Image (spheres, rainbow, N blue to C red):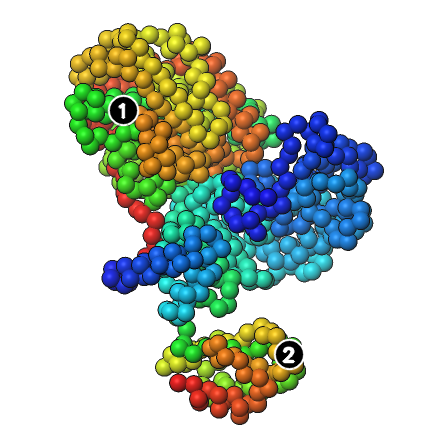
Amino acid sequence: MLVAEKNALTEEIEQLVEKYGKDRSALLEILHEIQKKHRSIPDFAQQEVARLLEIHPVEVYSVISFYTFLNTEPKGRNLVRICQTISCDMKNKQAVVNAVERELGVKIGETTRDRKFTVEYTNCMGLCDQGPAMAVNERVYMKLTPEKAVEILNEVK
Amino acid sequence: MENKDTRAPKSQQPHVVPKPEHPEHIGGSISIEINEKKVVVPMGTTILEACRNEGIHVPTLCHHDDLCVAGVCRICVVEVEGMRTLQAACAFPITAPIKIKTSTTMVRKARRHVIDLMLSEHYGECYACVRNNNCELQSLANEYNVDHYNFGHVKESQHEVDDSSYSVVRDMDKCVLCKRCVRTCIDLQEVGVLEASNRGDETKIATFLDKDLADVICINCGQCINRCPTGALHEKAVSDPIWEAIEDPTKHVVMQTAPSPRAAIGEEFGLPAGHSMTQELNTAIRRIGFDAVFDTNFTADLTIIEEGTELIIRLFQALVEKKEDVALPQFTSCSPGWVKYLEHFYPEYIDNLSTAKSPQQMFGALLKTFYAEKIGVDPKDIVTVATMPCAAKKYECNRPEMNDSGFKDVDYGLTTRELAKMIKEAGINLPEMPKSHFDNPFGDASGAGLIFGATGGVMEAAIRSVVEFVTGVKAEDVFERANVMPVRGFDGIKIMEIPIGDQVGPVPELIKHLVPNWDWLKGATLKVAVAHGTANAKKVMEDIKAGGELSKCHFIEFMACPGGCLGGGGQPIPTSPEIRKKRAEAIYAEDESLELRKSHENPHVVQLYKEFLTEGPCGHKSHELLHTHYTKRGKYIA
């Protein structure tokens, strides 16, 4: 990482710490903001957050590794998350998964070569009566069919 | 209940009820029933404490006397009447008149389940494990009659062994996720190497970014090893190459032993804590096949002379020559864990560290120069081994700068535990050994060197010598039996002031060329401090940074491990405040039993300055062999 990039990141995190406070409970909010902007939380950012909150970098890493929505390596520009829990499974989520995998040419957990999509499983999104369910970035889609899923992906830029 | 001592948020702190100051007052105590026996306990006592006081055994695993309550392993569950579920005894503060049952079918079944679940993920066999016969999981399995695996047993290794570090090996296949190492590293030592990562059945203890231990900011103190209940953490063994060297007739293999291992190694042979085995150990080491055995206390004495002289030079520069950039307070540099801690977390204070090497490294350099010449052996054929209570010493002897003799000064750092294993392997029962003395030309050292093993010991040794140097008065006339009590004991940070008064003595011959007289110290007060455990070291450093009371000190002793070296990461397992207290008592008792109790009176040290280090302490040759430099490391990982 270049020094200029590091300095910019430090400044950004300093502002976030100012906004959310130095308490340990501010950690998640800060990490979410970094994740949103950079699509991942770089190593250096983790150490800076730790320094500013006066905790250890490994504690920041521990929190990031705990939550699926936080990651240390950048994923694709769009995140596709398909519900893997039992209700959606019984509504034939597998057909949706197959269609998505075929359309994007990647398996679950992988990122497309143009880095446009990353496909993942997710646990229950609370839409058990609306399955199968899938989230693309922050929007949720319900009662999917394989065709509908492909259509949704094609609409994503 | 907010606990000011921990940084954890309220939600993560265990439910602790503070004990009342006067339990005998109304409302201060509470009557409970344990296994139908009526007991009165102070409010806030945990069920575990209440049971232990009554002599009732409740098994524990994640609980450790040095660490905060975690309540994660659930092995200590008991039945509390009226409660739907079993309760963890270690994390249940008593605030109501409850009835407890510690051994019902439900309790036994639950405990057995916990053990079975742990064993189902615990890869490896007991007979091929460093902790065989000293493993808490193994004992629990024994206690609960585990004769088969109810939930199966993992057949293949799930994790790679991380042996990247010179000191600590992590074998996560044997981890039971008790988080003792996490609490040790974060709370006790405040270094923060380890924490749980991931979630659910994928949870594992990991370093920052799951890197190798050698690549993260670890000070190698090994405290995590001492508290690990299983073989998941252990020191990097070096006994194989040592056996090889002993077998090799062309090699002259010598051993130096530090003070703390002697006070603790008996524990490995079934003796209770607090038995000094110095002279039995000498015999055992010779019988293993070492060509000579020396006392690290000799170089501890030498350290006092070198480090004390360095302090006098610094004070002289600051007070008389009025130099502005003199780094004061001077910090001790005997503890390699502390040295690395400073290099990482407070690199801006590197100039405050005494440049004197630790006793281990001084001895290494002397053995391959002075001693080699004396006995007429090529230093390349000398193998130097150091028995230390320490895991970080393994790292220290591998520092690239530690080869001032032209060779690797100390070839192998051996922990107390490893030496005990070597002795057992040689078929020797240590307590039965006849006594014998250390070998010449270094001989038996002083009691001042011996007490290096306890927190405050370096300071006490330094005070005994400095007081005599400066005032010309015998240390015995200043302190009763020359025992400097204010720097002893296990308080986290100890501060002491020593007024010099108006009477100063002549400058001793040894350092006459450095200071003309002591007039400049008339009426001065020497202020010193002692800290043990890096969490306390951190408090001291923050105070110095803020310009607080401790920044006015002249000399500060730091030890990375709680209790000093006697609680080091290479010492016998288990450890607890009581065990460390007993070891300290053994060390101080041995010191009092010695004739020679002051470093500068050690005749072998005096002889060394006459014969070899002819330019005196901090002279050219001393600097070449006995002093070192440090590296500003910082706390960022690229």
Q: Secondary structure at mark 2?
A: helix
Left/right placement of residue B37 relative to residue A153 reads right
Identify residue type, mark 1: Leu
Q: Is residue B299 left or right of residue B19?
A: left
In the rendered image, residue B150, in percent from the top left (x then y), is placed at: 72, 58
In this picture, is A1 found above or below B270? below
Q: Which mark's residue is nearer the viewer, 1 or 2?
A: 2
Q: Chain of mark 1?
A: B
Check the image and report above or below for A52 versus B494: below
Disc 2: host chain: A
* Vertical arrangement, residue B71 with respect to residue B369, above or below: below
Q: Looking at the rendered structure, which numbered label has been put on residue B276?
A: none
**Mark 2: amino acid:** Cys
- Give the residue at x 64% y 78%: A128
Q: Nearer the viewer, residue B635 or B418?
A: B635
Quadrant showing the C terminus of chain B: bottom left
Which residue position holds label 2?
Answer: A128
Horizontal and vertical percent for residue B616?
21, 20
- Comparing B194 with B263, the one in front is B194
Q: Residue at x 39, y 56 (%)?
A: A17
Q: Decide if residue B502 is in sight here.
A: yes
Judged left or right of residue B181, residue B401 is left
Disc 1 marks which residue?
B311
Can I make out residue A58 in this image? Answer: no
Distance, label 1 to label 2, CA atoms, is: 73 Å
Q: State the image coordinates of residue B633 (x, y, percent, origin top left).
A: 30, 46
Q: In this rendering, would B307 be left or right of B51?
A: left
